[in-house]
């Protein structure tokens, strides 16, 4: 699926990828949903992205999605109220956001998997409602908002929804493959 460049495409992609994500999760047995990720060391050593070692289970992946939804929701809300805030909150920035992701992970180690599922469902609904409040031009025309910088609001929405859901599904598929290979 190509990256959305219109409001209808954004809403369609966000919802389609969201449904695919839940269909994938729902296809897992309860044991698979609750299992710890078991990616082999050779695989982990080849990965450049820290998230492969950071996230240990489905809860961690879902919490990551929820927290990035919250980043978008809070960023838009603050800026609409005239409170100029960057997307990545201080003390983090685009060079150090990996540390922010680790903080999200640490903050939710006691969050139950069932709660993480509900949190993502609620925050996804909030994101869709937020997107619906903007016109196509507001979402995808550059310079519609001073606080989006050189990007568009729509591109942030794509990143927080369909692109992040793709990321999650790749990770979950790797978990399924590893889990089932180890439990044959």
Image (cartoon, rainbow, N blue to C red):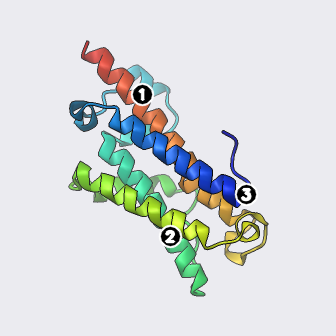
Q: Is residue 72 visible?
A: no
Earlier sequence position, callout 3 versus callout 2? 3
What secondary structure is found at the residue carrying circle 3?
loop
Which residue, as the protein is rendered here, is positioned at the far bottom?
Answer: 82
Which residue, as the protein is rendered here, is positioned at the far top?
Answer: 184
Q: Is residue 47 left or right of residue 79?
A: left
Front-most of residues 167 and 105: 167
Q: Residue at image x 27%, y 36%?
A: 33
Residue 135 x %, y %: 70, 71
Between circles 1 and 3, the one closer to the viewer is 3
Badge 3: residue crowd in 10 Å (few <14, some 14–19, many ≥20): some
User: Which label belongs to residue 2?
Assistant: none
Gap between marks 1 and 3, in whole Å?
Answer: 31 Å
Gap between marks 2 and 1, in whole Å?
Answer: 29 Å
Q: Residue at image x 50%, y 70%?
A: 73
Q: Residue at image x 31%, y 19%?
A: 180
Front-most of residues 43 and 130: 130
**In the figure, 23 relative to 132: above or below?**
above
Earlier sequence position, callout 2 versus callout 1? 2
Front-most of residues 54 and 156: 156
Q: Quadrant of residue 87?
A: bottom right
Residue at the spot of label 3: 6
Badge 1: residue crowd in 10 Å (few <14, some 14–19, many ≥20): some
Residue contact at pointers 3 and 2, CB within 8 angstroms: no
User: Which label belongs to residue 174?
Assistant: 1
Residue 169 x %, y %: 46, 37
Q: Residue at image x 46%, y 67%?
A: 126
Residue at the spot of label 2: 73
How many numbered marks are there?
A: 3
Residue 149 x %, y %: 72, 69
């Amino acid at each position: 699926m190509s990256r959305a460049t219109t409001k209808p495409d954004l809403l369609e992609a966000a919802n389609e990828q969201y449904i695919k994500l839940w269909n994938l999760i729902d296809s897992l047995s309860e044991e698979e949903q609750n299992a710890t990720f078991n990616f082999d060391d050779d695989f982990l050593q080849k990965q450049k992205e820290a998230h492969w070692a950071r996230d240990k289970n489905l809860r961690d992946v879902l919490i990551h999605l929820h927290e990035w939804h919250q980043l978008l929701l809070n960023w838009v809300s603050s800026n609409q109220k005239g409170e100029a805030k960057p997307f990545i909150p201080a003390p983090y920035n685009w060079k150090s956001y990996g540390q922010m992701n680790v903080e999200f992970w640490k903050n939710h180690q006691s969050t139950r998997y069932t709660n993480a599922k509900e949190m993502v469902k609620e925050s996804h609904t909030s994101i869709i409602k937020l997107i619906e409040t903007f016109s196509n031009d507001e979402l995808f025309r550059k310079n519609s908002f001073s606080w989006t910088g050189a990007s568009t609001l729509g591109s942030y929405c794509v990143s927080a929804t369909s692109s992040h859901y793709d990321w999650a599904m790749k990770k979950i598929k790797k978990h399924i493959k590893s889990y089932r290979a180890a439990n044959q």
